[in-house]
Image (cartoon, rainbow, N blue to C red):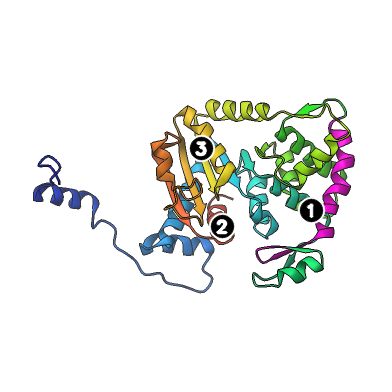
Amino acid sequence: MVSEKEKVTPEEREAYEKKNLKKIPVKDIKVTKGMTVDDMLKAMGRAGGFTAQKLADATDIVEKMNKDKNCLKILSFPACIMATGTRGVLVDMVKNHMVDLIITTCGCLDHDISRLYAAYYKGDFMMDDALLRENEVSRLGNVLVPDDCYGYVLEDNLLPLFDEIFAETNSLTTHEIIDKVGEHIADTKPKGYQDSLLYWAHVNKVPIVVPGITDGSFGCQLWMYYQTHRKLRIDLFGDEQMLSEMSNDAKKTGAIIIGGGISKHHVIWWNQFRGGLDYCIYLTTAEEFDGSLSGARIREAVSWGKVKASAKKMTVEGDATITLPLIYAGVANRLL
């Protein structure tokens, strides 16, 4: 039942429609020769529907976030896209100072380091997985990762490096360990080093925090190192302290959140203590109906105080290997 108080009068409805509706007409997309990605995004913004509009709005938000000199810009993402060419977009964002802080998963480190020293290959979602295993190849979606391009590469390069990293101390945060790996890449300059996220994060002083550091090959190498160095400690509280200080010291905060899980939650968690994010876009393929963190839209975070009600925010449904390059291309065209 709707109470008398909740009923909307015809006059109120008309006033609302005059104020909020029928203001911006839908415009057809016109594809022209020489059209840029940014041109297409702007055309999508005039088109009115459906995810095209969201993609255009998200691009505008990222542009505003980067123009706001008082804004701490945070990027979070899962490991999988680092195994694809989208790695190049993430690297360019850091290289071009569009990111001040990264929160990600252990696999991001695995793939970035592995691809410095070996190649990944194009595959197919429907390949014979048993046959792949017989040939010592792992499948990540439609990307192929040979064993000798992954685990062995990390073991050969990380274990000796840990001796250098922990030469003067037994306790470091994840962002300190990762920065030292980036420093090593900068010093040794292996082939393709300028394609490395860890390299550019070190050069531009962008801390990379990995809350679940043991959940991947990099973390497994740390565990193996621990077998002969029992005083080794990973200072996770030091990471959290830095996140708390960075978010609270910032006049404004904004985030590009790709996918869900621990990386997403770490971004919004620490921002609740400062009243919420001021800018936020969320790129996801997850569904909302199951109540999961990954499926939760940005609007849900408003109820927790993790995103401000007044924030410029947008959730874009779709594969981030499509949506992120388009958004970055649009913003780069406007700002670089």
Q: What's the residue type where badge 3 is placed?
A: Ile
On the question of residue 70 being in view, the answer is no
Q: Which mark is residue 114?
A: 1
Q: Which mark sits nearer the N-terminus, 2 or 1?
A: 1
Residue at position x 41%, y 43% in the image: 300
Residue occupied by mark 3: 268
Task: Report the magenta residues as a range.
Answer: 139-166
Q: Which mark sits nearer the N-terminus, 3 or 2?
A: 3
x, y percent for residue 209: 66, 37
Element marked by disc 1: helix
Secondary structure character of the magenta stretch overall: helix
Position of residue 330 in the picture relative to residue 137 (left or right) = left
Residue at position x 47%, y 31% in the image: 272
x, y percent for residue 94: 65, 45
Q: Which mark sits nearer the N-terminus, 1 or 3?
A: 1
Q: Which mark is residue 91?
A: none
Q: Classify 10 Å Cα crowding around label 2: few (below 14), some (14-19), many (20 and above).
A: many
Q: CA distance from mark 1 to mark 3?
A: 30 Å
Q: Which mark is residue 320?
A: 2
Position of residue 116 in the picture relative to residue 33 (left or right) = right
Position of residue 92 in the picture relative to residue 12 (left or right) = right
Q: What's the residue type where badge 2 is placed?
A: Ala
- Seen in the picture, residue 307 relative to 127 is either above or below; the reply is above
Residue at position x 51%, y 68% in the image: 35
Q: What's the residue type where badge 1 is placed?
A: Ser
Q: Foreground residue, 257 or 214? A: 214
Q: Classify 10 Å Cα crowding around label 1: few (below 14), some (14-19), many (20 and above).
A: many
- Seen in the picture, residue 33 relative to 313 is either above or below; the reply is below
Residue at position x 43%, y 49% in the image: 314
x, y percent for residue 216: 72, 46
